[in-house]
């Protein structure tokens, strides 16, 4: 199986996510995040390998929520030797967006910068 198009999708998702054009949310699977599009959704999932370490999986779901394509970082390494690092990076970006990490940090910093808060 050729993973060229999935690799291209991964790169496009990263670019659009970094630009703030793709929104991520927590999905129903533990440890996974989802970006929804009109007819399809993409999920990124992190799981532990039996022999230690982590594995990242990208899945495409149809409008019924059924998986129509799926690949792990190991699968993707056939076409991209940096697949593990790139999937891990996108996963972390998606997690931070879905969890609202930047908003939380901004709010906390603004509260701590408030001169009325005693230290």
Image (cartoon, rainbow, N blue to C red):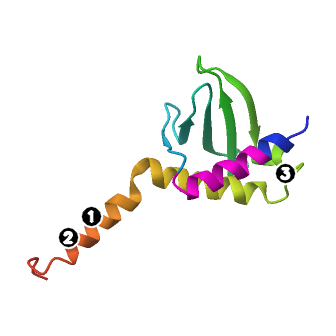
User: Viewer-proximal residue, 109 or 74?
Assistant: 109
On the image, the x and y values in percent for residue 43 come to 61, 37
Please state if 65 lies on the left or on the right of 11 as rendered: left
Residue at 32% of width from left, 66% of height from top? Answer: 106
Q: CA distance from mark 3 to mark 2?
A: 44 Å
Question: Which residue in the protein does label 3 denote?
Answer: 77
On the image, the x and y values in percent for residue 90 come to 62, 54
Question: Which residue in the protein does label 1 denote?
Answer: 107
Is the residue under label 3 in contact with that under label 1 (CB below 8 Å)? no
Please state if 80 lies on the left or on the right of 34 as rendered: right
User: Do we see residue 88 in this rendering?
Assistant: yes
Alpha-carbon neighbours of circle 3 within 10 Å: few (<14), some, or many (≥20)? some
| Mark positioned earlier in the residue sequence (1 or 3) | 3
Alpha-carbon neighbours of circle 1 within 10 Å: few (<14), some, or many (≥20)? few
The magenta span reads 8-20
Residue at 82% of width from left, 46% of height from top? Answer: 76
Which secondary structure lies at badge 1? helix
Which secondary structure lies at badge 3? loop
Is the residue under label 1 in contact with that under label 2 (CB below 8 Å)? yes
Q: Within the magenta stretch, is there residue 33?
A: no
């Amino acid at each position: 199986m050729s993973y060229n198009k999935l690799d291209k999708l991964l790169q496009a998702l990263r670019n659009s996510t970094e630009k703030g054009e793709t929104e991520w949310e927590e999905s129903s699977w533990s440890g996974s995040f989802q970006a929804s599009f009109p007819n399809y959704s993409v999920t990124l999932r992190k799981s532990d390998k039996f022999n230690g370490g982590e594995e990242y999986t990208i899945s495409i779901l149809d409008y019924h929520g059924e998986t129509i394509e799926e690949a792990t970082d190991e699968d993707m390494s056939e076409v991209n030797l940096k697949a593990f690092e790139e999937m891990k990076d996108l996963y972390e970006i998606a997690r931070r967006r879905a969890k609202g990490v930047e908003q939380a940090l901004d709010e906390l910093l603004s509260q701590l910068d408030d001169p009325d808060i005693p230290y």
